[in-house]
Image (cartoon, rainbow, N blue to C red):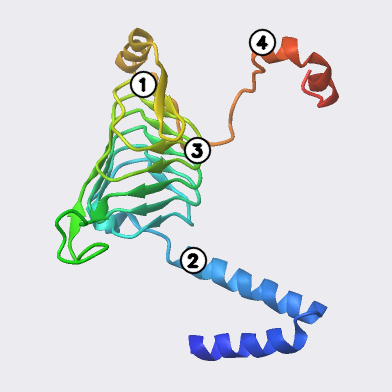
Amino acid sequence: MDEIVIFAMNIIKKIFSKTRLYRFVAWQWNRFNEEEQLKQRLRPDQFREYGQGVRIDPDVRINMPSRVVLKDRVMILRGCNFNTIGGLYVGENSGFGMNCTLWTWQHRYLNSECIPYDANADLKPVIIRDFVWIGAHVQIVAGIEIGEGAIVGMGSVVTKSVPPFAIVMGNPATIIGYRDKEHFLKCKAEKKFGSLTLVGNYKENIVKMFKIRYEKELKELGLM
């Protein structure tokens, strides 16, 4: 059935590619694909463990959820693509921004039976501890551990493990600072946990430095 639909779409494209009719049909085809993806949304019962309050956006791709543990209140935003053959463990109150990529295995190329690699898959699980925030468009290679309370800046490529409370950024990701450990542990002891799943419900604050530096522009933007 799918082959017939694709063949028909190719004929339509060839005949009507520059007409409004074609653009309308193409739009309907895209809508159909989006609805099919929503039908294939990941279900909690597919995971090794699926905690309470977990949020996974509809277009997240996880190829082997049976090897994934998600503790309570984990958030994975749209566009993330995780290859979890080697295993993925995500601690509670940890989250991924949009369009992150994560890998948990690699081809065997050292002493392989053939080149560029052989048929063996070396499994290297990724471990994400509690209260970790991973920004948008981050890439994480196989075998990485990200310590409790760490922050990974947007667009970073994580090629080695990140210590607890570290703030890393760049390609490759390097440590640019640390969270205040005492403040972090105090909030943890008092159970002052932010809700990662309530995206968009923020109290907006303009950083003082930007108020001073860009006062004119901020006024034009209607932010002051």
Residue beneath disc 2? 37
Badge 1 element = strand
Q: Which of 126 and 74 is in front in this view?
A: 126
Which residue is identified by label 3?
155
- Answer with the quarter of the image where residue 72 lies: top left
Q: Residue at x 41, y 34 (%)?
A: 172
Residue on which the image places disc 1: 166
Q: How far apart are marks 4 and 1 (CA)?
A: 24 Å
| Residue 208, label in figure | 4
Q: Distance between the residues labelled 2 and 3?
A: 26 Å
- Which of discs 4 and 1 lies nearer the camera? The answer is 1
Q: In which quarter of the image is residue 221?
A: top right
Give the mark nearest the N terminus, 4 or 1.
1
Query: Residue 200: x and y, percent?
Result: 59, 35
Residue 31: image location, x then y, percent: 62, 69
Mark toward the start of the polypeptide (2 vs 3): 2
